[in-house]
Image (tube, rainbow, N blue to C red):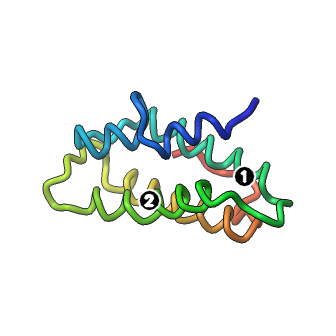
Amino acid sequence: MDDLEPLRREFDAEDGSFLLQLRSDLHWDRQAFSRLEKTMRRVCAQQETEDRLDRWLVEGYWYMADFVPDWTGHPDFPRPEPTEYYEAALERLRDIQNWFVTGRSPYHAWPDL
């Protein structure tokens, strides 16, 4: 399965994407986040041996790890899930970004959120 196109749609905040819901609706869609982070992990695994990374991918991974914590960190951002879930999700984004940049996964098995 080619994960690059779905990931590009997520990074471009197209209809139905986690990022669009987060920015436009101030809604953290847990299922959309799960779909996004799993796609990001699959792409990391596919890119581990690459010597060069496409700029749009680098920008997308950076943006997710930088923007999402900043945007959702506002005191008025709605958080219906337990605080621990959001903390784990933001840590997950940082860990995925680290994997993407270094080519080394910080985990042997990624726990479900």
Q: Residue at x 67, y 62 (%)?
A: 100
Query: Could you say which is closer to the camera, residue 18 or residue 106?
Result: 18
Q: Residue at x 71, y 44 (%)?
A: 42
Label 2: few (<14), some (14–19) or many (≥20) C-alpha neighbours in 10 Å:
some
Residue assigned mark 1? 109
User: Which label sits in the foreground, 1 or 2?
Assistant: 2
71 left or right of 100 in image: left
Estimate the x, y position of residue 4 in percent, counting from the top left.
67, 40
- Residue ranking furthest to the front: 55
Query: Could you say which is closer to the camera, residue 57 or residue 109?
Result: 57
- Residue 90: numbered disc: 2
Query: Could you say which is closer to the camera, residue 73 or residue 86?
Result: 73
112 relative to 53, above or below: above
- Residue ranking furthest to the right: 49
Question: Could you tell me which secondary element the residue under label 1 belongs to?
Answer: loop
- Can you tell which quarter of the image residue 58 is in? bottom right
Name which of mark 1 and mark 2 comes first in the sequence: 2
Question: Could you tell me which secondary element the residue under label 2 belongs to?
Answer: helix
Estimate the x, y position of residue 84 in percent, counting from the top left.
38, 56
Q: Residue at x 62, y 60 (%)?
A: 55
Estimate the x, y position of residue 113 in percent, counting from the top left.
51, 46
